[in-house]
Every structure is written in structure tokens, then in C-alpha cells.
Image: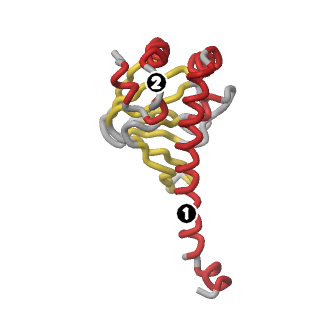
Amino acid sequence: MVSIEDLKKIALFRNLTDQMLEELLPVVQEESFGEREIIYEAGNAATHFYSLKRGKVLLEAELAPTLIISLGAIKPGYSFGWVSLNLPATHTSYAVSVEPSELLVMSGNEYSDLLDRNEAMGYLVMRNAAEILENRLERRTEQFLKVITKHPQIGTLLGL
């Protein structure tokens, strides 16, 4: 069973009051996944939002049947499946547990409805989400620029 203490460990829910966390509890379920177990697949309907309680999850994309790339690693305390908050939507990547993992799972509809009903909670969660996603975007931008400057043709153009 999910507790308030479990929710307090999730970055997205920091700064929420105990009362807000109590309101969140009924929409959160705990699910366990084994090593290399698929949580969701690209192309499937995005109906749930996830926060990692324990373990490790990789977000992966299949570029070709023999080429799968990792888009990112989710560590405990962080969330994924953001597209489920903008229904209807489909996943663009796979989420795979790399080791036995415990996830906090919420229906995207129920979670969005709760944030709509409780505007103070919605504001705090979205403010936290903006900060988390901004940090993630900055890291990805840095990675992209680092990779692209190492490409031989780009390096030549840049005089590297």
C-alpha cells in the first residue's frame, strides 16, 4: 500500500502539504516489475503516469530491429509517462525496468482531474514539473551539442 512517506520521496510531489498528499493517495497504486520487463511500449495508448519508488527504468527507442537506443534512465524519486497527462496520446518510446523495480502508478485521467479540482496542488505539481523538465531538457541539449560537434563533417565545418 502506498503511503504519504512514499509520495514525499517523489521529486514531483515535493512542497505538497500532507493534506494534498492524502488527496493524492486514492489515485496511486503500487506495481512491481521484474528485470527487463516492459512497462509500456511505443505506439501504445498512454493512459498512466509513473513515478519510480525503487529500482531503475530505461526509456528506449527502437530505430531498427537491431538498433535500440537509450533515451534516458529514470532513478528513484523521478517520474515518466508525461504524455499521459495530455490524453488522448500514445507513447513514443519504450519503458523497461532494468532491475526489479517498484513504481507508483496513476491513471492519467484521474491524476489530471485531481489537479484540476485542487488548483493549489495543481500549481505546485506543475511548478515542480516545469523545473524537472527544464533540467532534463538542458541535459539533453548539452548531450546533443556534444555529440553533434564530434561528427566528422560538422567538426570540419566548425574548424575543429
Residue in the picture at 49% in, 45% down: 59
Q: Which residue is mark 1?
A: 142
Amino acid found under the numbered disc labelled 1: Glu
| Residue 135 percent coordinates (x, y) | 53, 50
| Residue 144 percent coordinates (x, y) | 57, 63
Please state which of residues 119 and 145 is positioned toward the viewer in this rendering: 119
Earlier in the chain: of badge 2 and badge 1, it is: 2
Residue in the picture at 65% in, 83% down: 158
* In this picture, residue 78 sits left or right of residue 126: left
Specify the quadrant that holds the N terminus: top left
Q: Nearer the viewer, mark 2 or mark 1?
A: 1
| Residue 62 percent coordinates (x, y) | 54, 50
Q: Which residue is mark 2?
A: 105
* In this picture, residue 147 sits left or right of residue 15: right
Give neighbour class at mark 1: few <14, some 14-19, many 20+ (Cα, 10 Å).
few
Rendered view: 7 above or below 82 = above
Give neighbour class at mark 2: few <14, some 14-19, many 20+ (Cα, 10 Å).
some
Specify the quadrant that holds the C terminus: bottom right
| Residue 19 percent coordinates (x, y) | 46, 14
Classify residue 109 by image quadrant: top right
Which element is circle 2 on?
A: strand
Amino acid found under the numbered disc labelled 2: Val
* In this picture, residue 52 sits left or right of residue 45: left
Please state which of residues 156 and 2 is positioned toward the viewer in this rendering: 2
Residue in the picture at 42% in, 25% down: 104
Are the two marked residues, 2 and 1, in contact with CB atoms closer than 8 angstroms? Answer: no
CA gap between label 2 and label 1 equals 30 Å
